[in-house]
Image (spheres, rainbow, N blue to C red):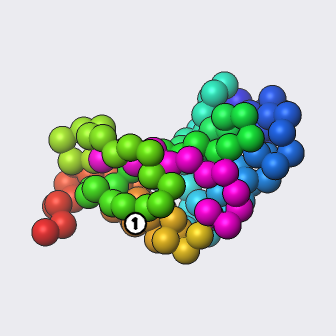
Amino acid sequence: MTVDDYLASVTNEGARDLFRRFQAMVEACGPSEPAARKTIVYWKRTRIFAGAFVLGRRLELNIDLLRKAEHPCLLAAFPHTKRVITHRLRIASADQLDAPLGALLAEAYAEVGPGTRTRRVPA
């Protein structure tokens, strides 16, 4: 399945636009591989570092970090592994795809994307 296959089932144009904007933010971080499923699209390097899916008119995000972070769109942060914390965010408008979110995404790309087995936890 491809990203376009996933988006073919998204009927809300605004939500599709939010998804494409987030996809562009992911691609701006550097090379990664999308892994589209029926209900979500993940992006990975060696390891998955982000995911996105459309829920109605909104975009729901998963961003994996080695620390707990704050963001106004944050719904929850929970341990995914001993070291990785998944951050669940809800995006309702394009202005929420902001620089602080981009910084979290870049951090996930750099710190979690390459894999965490041999990486040390930041102090």
Residue drawn 50% across the image and 48% down it: 89
Above or below, 43 relative to 25? above
Name the side, left or right, on which 64 lies relative to 116: right
Image quarter in which the C terminus is found: bottom left
Mark 1 is surrounded, within 10 Å at the Cα level, by few (under 14), some (14 to 19) or many (20 or more) other residues, namely some
Magenta region, residue range: 85-97
89 inside magenta stretch = yes
Residue drawn 18% across the image and 66% down it: 122
Residue receiving disc 1: 107
51 inside magenta stretch = no
Q: Residue furthest left?
A: 123
* Nearest to the observer: residue 64 or residue 58: 58
Give residue 76's position: percent from left, percent from top.
38, 43
Can you tell which quarter of the image residue 10 is in?
A: top right
Secondary structure at badge 1 equals helix
Residue type for callout 1: Glu
Image quarter in which the N terminus is found: top right
Residue 56 in view in this figure: yes
Give residue 111's position: percent from left, percent from top.
34, 62
Give residue 40's position: percent from left, percent from top.
61, 34
Q: Residue furthest front?
A: 72
Residue drawn 66% across the image and 51% down it: 92
Q: Residue furthest top?
A: 38
Can you tell which quarter of the image residue 36 is in?
A: top right
Residue 27 in view in this figure: no
